[in-house]
Image (spheres, helix red, strand yellow):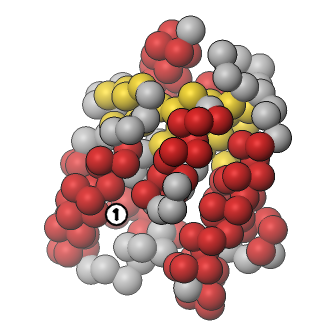
Amino acid sequence: MKNTLVLLGYMASGKSAVAHVVATMSNLKFIDLDTVISQKAGMRIQDIFKTKGEIYFRKKEQLYLDEILSENSKIVLAVGGGTPCYGQNMNLINKKAISVFIKTPLKTLISRLLAEKNTRPLVADLNDADLTEFVAKHLFERRPFYEKAQYIIDAQNKSIAAIASEILETIK
């Protein structure tokens, strides 16, 4: 197995929660790319978006992704929902890691995002009525990038533990 496992998918798909469980089950280190970006910048992701803008964020995201993947460590890495869609990030992920797309139903994403809106910079300013249309459109644009993952796991009606087990079984 390549050393790094990268979990990707839309925001609120459960990437970080599943990655944490996969890391625990396989006795590997868990890293969340957004957490790395936030720590290195000394501010929350939503504050980076507000004060420095998305382009600045995407440049830092690509830099730290490359750094992490170049370390060649045995880790489980959760990336942000937009990470695979910018620059050569998806090609880099597939070249240096095992990639898994956690495919989560729109209805599930919407219900999670409604509960977490204030911590999600891309949807924080949307009213609830516009959220479904925004996410559906965004998901439509991003899906081709996500589907370049080496493995796709359908998360519908599955617990975090079940998804984690399925990932480990699939990548054996």
Q: Indicate the position of residue 16 as horizontal and vertical percent values.
A: 58, 43
Q: Indicate the position of residue 17 as horizontal and vertical percent values.
A: 56, 39
- Hey, which quadrant is residue 140 in on the image? bottom left
**Image position of 97 with respect to 11: above or below:** above
- Hey, which quadrant is residue 97 in on the image? top right
Res 21 seen here: no
Quadrant into which the C terminus falls: top right
**Crowding near the residue tagged with mark 1, few <14, some 14–19, many ≥20 C-alpha atoms within 10 Å:** some
Quadrant into which the N terminus falls: top right
**Image position of 55 with respect to 137: above or below:** below
Q: Indicate the position of residue 131 as horizontal and vertical percent values.
A: 25, 69
List the residue tagged with mark 1: 114
Residue that appears at 72% across and 58% down: 64
- Mark 1 belongs to which amino acid? Leu
Residue lying at the far bottom in this picture: please name it. 51
Q: On the picture, is 93 further left or further right than 114?
A: right
Q: Indicate the position of residue 151 as horizontal and vertical percent values.
A: 42, 26
Residue that appears at 51% across and 45% down: 91
**Image position of 83 with respect to 14: above or below:** below
- Hey, which quadrant is residue 114 in on the image? bottom left
Residue that appears at 24% across and 69% down: 134
Residue that appears at 61% across and 80% down: 56
**Image position of 109 with respect to 123: above or below:** above
Q: Secondary structure at mark 1?
A: helix
Q: On the picture, is 29 further left or further right than 83?
A: right
Looking at the image, which is closer to me, 151 or 33? 151
Looking at the image, which is closer to me, 89 or 167? 89
